[in-house]
Image: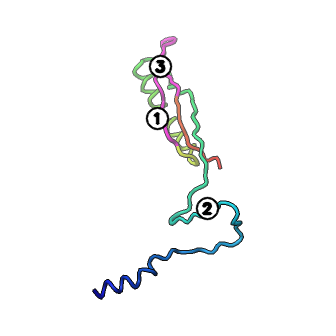
């Protein structure tokens, strides 16, 4: 019973809303004041860019060797693309479909490599 009386006595103080005094804001217009806890939201804007490049492996007398050369060229291109885009975020890197051809007893494999990067605009 005693606890109930204490709670009832404190109830008007608990129900009071917090008030904030704000100066130099016109009261004739609708105004919204937002207070958030935590880190400040970022105002940065980003753009997604898609680029395409030709990837070609070294020529070789055997088709098997030409495919291995293309795989090596693909791995080098992926590594180089990621190293050159350190300021932006690389979203995807794809060497594309390998196509091989034979000319003058030498085979060469090539493809169209594509990559997507996220670049900060603002």
Q: In this rendering, is residue 13 above or below 57?
A: below
Q: What whole-number distance in Å separates the C-alpha atoms at marks 3 and 1?
A: 16 Å
Work out whether 105 lies above or below 73.
above
Depth check, front residue: 25 or 115: 25
Q: Is residue 34 magenta?
A: no
Q: Residue 15 at what x, y percent from top left?
A: 45, 76
Marks 1 and 2, Cα distance to the nearest angstrom?
53 Å
Question: Residue 122's x, y, as percent?
Answer: 65, 50
Image spot of residue 99 (x, y percent): 47, 19
Residue extent of the magenta highlight: 90-112
Q: Residue 58 location, x and y as percent?
A: 50, 25
The residue where tag 1 is placed is 75
**Residue shown at the point (56%, 58%) measured from the top left:** 41
Say which residue appears at 54% left-offset and 37% top-offset: 116
Q: Is residue 18 above or below residue 76?
A: below
Camera-side residue of 93 and 19: 19
Q: CA distance from mark 3 to mark 2?
A: 60 Å
Answer whether labels 3 and 1 touch (C-beta < 8 Å).
no
Labels 1 and 2 touching (C-beta < 8 A): no
Q: Where does label 2 land, which residue? A: 32
Name which residue lies at 58% across and 48% down. Answer: 87
Q: Nearer the viewer, residue 12 or 20?
A: 12
Lower sequence index among marks 3 and 2: 2
Q: Quadrant of the N terminus?
A: bottom left
Sequence order check: which comes first, mark 3 or mark 1? Answer: 1
Mark found first going from the N terminus, 1 or 2: 2
The answer to whether 106 appears left or right of 45 in the picture is left
Q: Please, what secondary structure does the residue beneath circle 2 have?
A: loop
Q: The residue tagged with tag 3: helix, strand or loop?
A: strand
**Residue 108 lies in the magenta stretch:** yes
Q: Which residue is mark 3?
A: 99
What residue lies at 42% left-to-right and 18% top-to-bottom?
63
């Amino acid at each position: 019973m005693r606890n109930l009386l204490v709670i009832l006595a404190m109830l008007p103080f608990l129900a009071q809303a917090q008030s904030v005094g704000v100066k130099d804001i016109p009261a004739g217009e609708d105004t919204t004041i937002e207070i958030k806890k935590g880190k400040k939201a970022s105002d940065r804007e980003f753009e997604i860019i898609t680029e395409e490049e030709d990837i070609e492996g070294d020529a070789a007398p055997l088709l098997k060797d030409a495919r291995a050369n293309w795989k090596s060229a693909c791995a080098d291109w992926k590594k180089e693309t990621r190293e050159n885009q350190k300021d932006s975020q690389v979203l995807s890197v794809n060497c594309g479909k390998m196509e091989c051809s034979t000319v003058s007893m030498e085979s060469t494999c090539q493809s169209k490599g594509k990559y997507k990067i996220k670049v900060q605009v603002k």
